[in-house]
Amino acid sequence: MRRITAIFLPALLAACAAEPGTDDAGGEAPDRVSEFGRYEGYSEPRYDGWVTTSRYVEMRDGVRLAVEVTRPALGGAPESEPLPVVWTHSRYHRNPGRILRVIAPDLDPLPDIRSQVDANEDLQRLVLHGYVVAAAGVRGSGASFGRYEGLFSESETTDAVELIEWLASQPWSDGNVGMYGGSYLGITQYMAASRNPPALKAIFPDVAALDMYDLMYPGGVYRDDLIGHWGGLTREFDVSIPAPAVDEDVEGVLLRQAMEEHEDNWDVLEQYGAGRYRDHAAPELAWERHGPSGVLEDVLEAGVPAYHWNGWYDIFVTDATLWFANYRGPQKLGIGAWPHSGMPDPALMAERIELYAVEQHRWFDYWLKGIDNGVLDEAPIHYAIMNDPGDWRWVSSDVWPPETTSQRLFLAPGASGSVASVNDGGLSPDAPTAEAAFDEYLVDLSTTTGTSSRWDNAVGAAPEMVYPDLRDTDAKSLTYTTPPLVSDLTVTGHPVVTLWVTSSTRDADFFVLLEEVDAEGSSRYVTEGVLRASHRELADAPWDNLGLPFQRSYASDVEPLPDEPAELRLDLHPTSTVFNAGHRLRVTVMGADRDNAEEVSEDPPTVRVYRSATHPSSVELPVAAGS
């Protein structure tokens, strides 16, 4: 973090000084480049620093929200000319330095991060190029007053509209407003867009959800570990970890008063723990009303220009593709080889930071400054195709999913000789012919994908997402593995799994992993999906679901498993992965993921997965042309 504040600014200014041409004042125009990941010559940095101030802004009901404003400065003097404004509506205080003390307590020395801009290179770039950057704490959080009324509550969204109006009306604003930020801060952008405030000209939501039920209860399975981490962390932010006081609150009296009001905040663990079915409708949590999917039609009708940004290992990557499939306004989609937050690969982290900064800058220049930089003239989708870890390349597409061929592989008998699993089954392009064939096992409730999963990463519990070699996990599960591949196989899109199953307990959870196995037998995580068997009934999705199976999961839809085999259909999170020649592709079926999801019951079931002519379990892979 210190490198950002101490090195980035001089390096950027030096690089800018070395560019050919002059600025808009006259003279020879600089060379212009505007393409994915590169942006030069369309706007020049006009400033050498910034000045940050903070204050309270009063809402319609008298609740005061803490707002931080960073203005471009030259020689220490803030710019007086009105400029476009980009801002974020944050659940995590408005100063990330305080959050860092919680999620990275062993970092020594702790960096001096005074504002959002001090912490983020992408925001520094915007400020130096003539943007005002602002951050506001949502009501009931940080130094903001009020009671937190739930994730993406109606009052929170109304606050966003009022803040946009306030930002647009300030003397340092030219009336054009955009929004930035990731995760919660990405979702608040869609929520604000649902009201279509006139001044909101564009959004850049990063790693943001579409449907909160599918996050908390994917396939009907409660992600209790994820929400436990997040609920505990945000509770600490609200009542125990002080946010920075605003400038006017020199003695911190107002900050203490605000934190006292947070004591009665909405209880995320209680509320989400009670909402086991999608038709759950309590006064403060109704899945079909609260959250982005609850205002989806309003978001689509508004059509605020949106650049959806995500990563293949993020928990919201499916949502990003669904946003793109449903959106009606001008839009773009970018998906990289990264998870929700930090990562162990420094090259990938550097690329993520750079690409995000460039693409955000191009997007806001086009929509907030009216610079015709061609950002809408190119392919709307860019995504990374991942080879081995540390090896990826970017491609573009006009549609999602891109053109692929569905290749169906059937669960088959073994032995593959590649793993010491419960059954060591095979995967075959040939449909089964046996009249009665199945694999049976007693679910091992200690099975886990680890404590550094995409789910842990998303809530700061595993800043560097690293999945272990999955051989130990596979050993406790049912596995189905291909022979070594004779050529590279590129899977791009949404794999779909069909399982025919029974269970001794009339219910069971089925976690399905897609893995790549190298020549030495090491098994690498690629993607996953999950379905609780009692939630198996299919329904029409309330949005374009890309033809993927959709479980409505109403209370009335839940049915125990019958004695005879029942069909489960589930999709895995999308990926774009090259399975290398000489490697194997593996589908693993687990009955538990101890560290990442709630167990279906305390008594492990004995399950059967069928692979017969009448009950052919399989995986359908979207295979890219030429594979």
Image (spheres, rainbow, N blue to C red):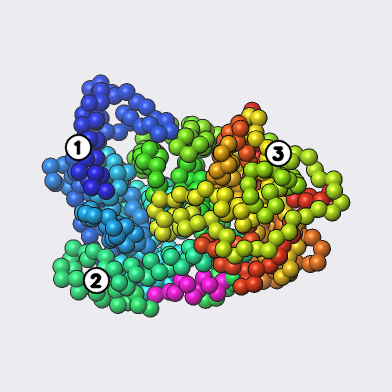
Residue pointed to by mark 1: 10
Going 65% across and 52% down the picture, which residue do you hit?
421
Q: CA distance from mark 3 to mark 1?
A: 52 Å
Specify the amino acid type for callout 1.
Pro
Location of residue 263 in the rendering, given as x and y in whole percent from the top left corner: 35, 77
Q: Residue furthest top?
A: 28
Marks 2/3: CA–CA distance: 59 Å
Q: Is residue 308 visible?
A: no
Q: Is residue 33 left or right of residue 513?
A: left
Disc 3 versus disc 1: nearer the observer: 3
What's drawn in magenta, residue-wise? 265-275
272 part of magenta stretch: yes
**Residue in the image at 31% along x and 28% along y:** 41
Q: Which mark is residue 255?
A: 2
Question: In which quadrant of the rendered view does residue 219 lie?
Answer: bottom right
Residue 573 drawn at (x, y percent): 58, 49
Question: Quarter-wise, where is residue 57 in the image?
Answer: bottom left
Q: Quadrant of the C terminus?
A: top right
Relative depth, front residue between 391 and 142: 391
Residue 336 location (% of width, % of height)? 47, 41
Find numbered disc 2 in the image and state the secondary structure of the residue it sits on.
helix
Around disc 1, counting alpha carbons within 10 Å, would you say few (fewer than 14), some (14 to 19), or many (20 or more)? few
Q: Amino acid at mark 3?
A: Gln
Number of residues whose C-alpha sits closer than 10 Å to that of mark 3, classed few (under 14), some (14–19) or many (20 or more): some
From this viewpoint, is residue 598 visible? yes
| Residue nearest the observer in this picture, 165 or 349 | 349
**For mark 3, what is the residue?**
407
Q: Residues within 10 Å of mark 2 (few under 14, many from 20)?
A: many
Does residue 259 appear left or right of residue 205 in this picture?
left
- Does dot 3 land on a helix, a strand or a loop? strand
